[in-house]
Image (spheres, rainbow, N blue to C red):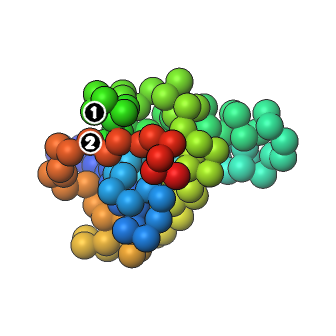
Amino acid sequence: MAGFTLQRREIVIKFADDTTLSGFEVTAKLDIPLSLFLEFQALGNETGPEGVRAACTLFSKEILLDWNLADDNGVRIEPTVEAFFELPQQDCTTIIQEWSSAVQEPDPLPSTTSNNLSPLEKGSDELMVLSPASH
């Protein structure tokens, strides 16, 4: 008898046109181990800069998979911990909040999980340029 293999899902977070992140897409793990989920939730309850730093590090290291971010010259910025920490604070918070909302849903619908989230599908190869002028 063959064993059952869990399929790990991913999600593409697409930001609404009426936000400063319009056009930005973030691909992240949707299905994470319970231990990682509980660790992330515990960090979310911590106050102060060290809790925020730890939550952002955990997200960018273990959950963030890809994004369509480029520098002012159109050169792709790899989705690393260091690059995540170079984003404006409010953008990091928004990304994590959107992911957290999606991960807490019992089972995302095939077409969308909310008005700005959709399951992973073949996405655009376009890179979004995030510069001070766009904020």
Whole-number angstrom distance, CA of label 1 to CA of label 2: 7 Å
Q: List x then y, in percent, for residue 78.
A: 36, 27
- Identity, as a three-letter code, of the amino acid under mark 2: Leu
Q: Is residue 56 visible?
A: yes
Q: Residue furthest right?
A: 48
Q: Which residue does the image show at 56% across and 56% down from the upper left? A: 94
Above/below status of 123 relative to 56: below
Q: Residue at x 43, y 70 (%)?
A: 18
- Residue at label 1? 74
Residue closer to the observer: 127 or 66: 127
Dot 2 falls on a residue whose secondary structure is loop
Q: Judge depth for marks 1 and 2 and give the one in front.
A: 1
Q: Which of the marked residues, 1 or 2, is nearer the chain's N terminus? A: 1
Within-10-Å neighbours for mark 1: few <14, some 14–19, many 20+: few
Q: Which residue is mark 2?
A: 127
Residue 76: % across, % down: 30, 30
Q: Which quadrant does the N terminus fall into?
A: top left
Label 1 sits on what residue type? Gly
Whole-percent x, y for residue 88 in the image: 59, 42
The reply to whether callout 1 and callout 2 are in contact (CB within 8 Å) is yes
Residue 99 position in % (x across, y down): 49, 56
> Residue at left 33%, top 56%?
23
Label ID, residue 19: none
- Which residue is more in the foreground, 125 or 53? 125
**Residue at the spot x=36%, y=33% of the render?**
72
Q: Is residue 107 visible?
A: no
Image quadrant where residue 108 sits? bottom left
